[in-house]
Amino acid sequence: MTGKRPTTIAEYIEAAPAESRPHLRTLYGILKSVAPEAQEAIKWGAPFFVEPRFLFSFSAHKAHCNFAPTQAALEAFQQELQGHRTTKNYLQIPYCEPVPEALVRQLAEYCLRAVRAREDDAFW
C-alpha cells in the first residue's frame, strides 16, 4: 500500500493491491454481518472491529490475506482449521484459494460471544 495512510476500512481495501481486494471485501462483509454494531478502526495499519474490546482484524499481504480472530478461537477450531495455513494468531488465506466463508463466520461468532461473555462477567 502506498500514499496516504487509510483511516477507514473502505480506504484500506481500496489502497490494497488489486489481487487482494476481492478477499478483503469478502472478509469485511462476513465480519460486518457478524458484528454490525462493532466500531471499525484502523489500528497498527490494519482494519479492526472493536466491541468494546478488539474482536478481530484482517490484513492484506503479498500473496495472502490474514484473518486475525483471537488465539483462543484458533485453538477452539483447530480441527476445522486442518488443511488451512495458520499461525499462532492468524488464518492465512492465499489469494489463489477462495475465502473459507463458513469457517471465518464461525471464528468471528466465537470471538463475539467470548467478548460479550467477558463483559457480563462481574470479575472481568
Image (spheres, grey):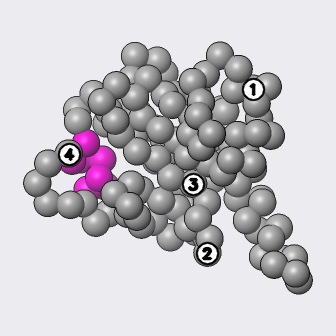
Specify the segment rendered in magenta. Answer: 10-16
Question: Which label belongs to residue 56?
Answer: 3
Looking at the rendering, which quadrant does residue 101 occupy? Answer: top right
Instruction: Assess whether mark 2 and mark 3 are in contact (beta carbons under 8 angstroms).
Output: no
**Residue for badge 4:** 1
Looking at the picture, how far across and down is residue 48, in whole percent? 47, 59
Nearer-the-camera pick, 106 or 91: 91
Three-letter code for the amino acid on which mark 4 is drawn: Met
The 10 Å Cα crowd at callout 4, few under 14, some 14 to 19, many 20 or more, is few
Three-letter code for the amino acid on which mark 1 is drawn: Glu
**Residue for badge 2:** 52
Q: Secondary structure at mark 4?
A: loop
Q: Residue at x 55, y 46 (%)?
A: 68
Quarter holding the C terminus? Answer: bottom right
Q: Residue at x 30, y 30 (%)?
A: 62
The answer to whether 76 appears left or right of 109 in the picture is right
State which tag comes first along the sequence, 3 or 4: 4
State which tag comes first along the sequence, 2 or 1: 2
Looking at the picture, how far across and down is residue 36, in whole percent? 57, 62
| In the image, farthest residue toward the front | 88
Q: Residue at x 63, y 39 (%)?
A: 88
**Residue for badge 1:** 80
Rendered position, 6 above or below 79: below
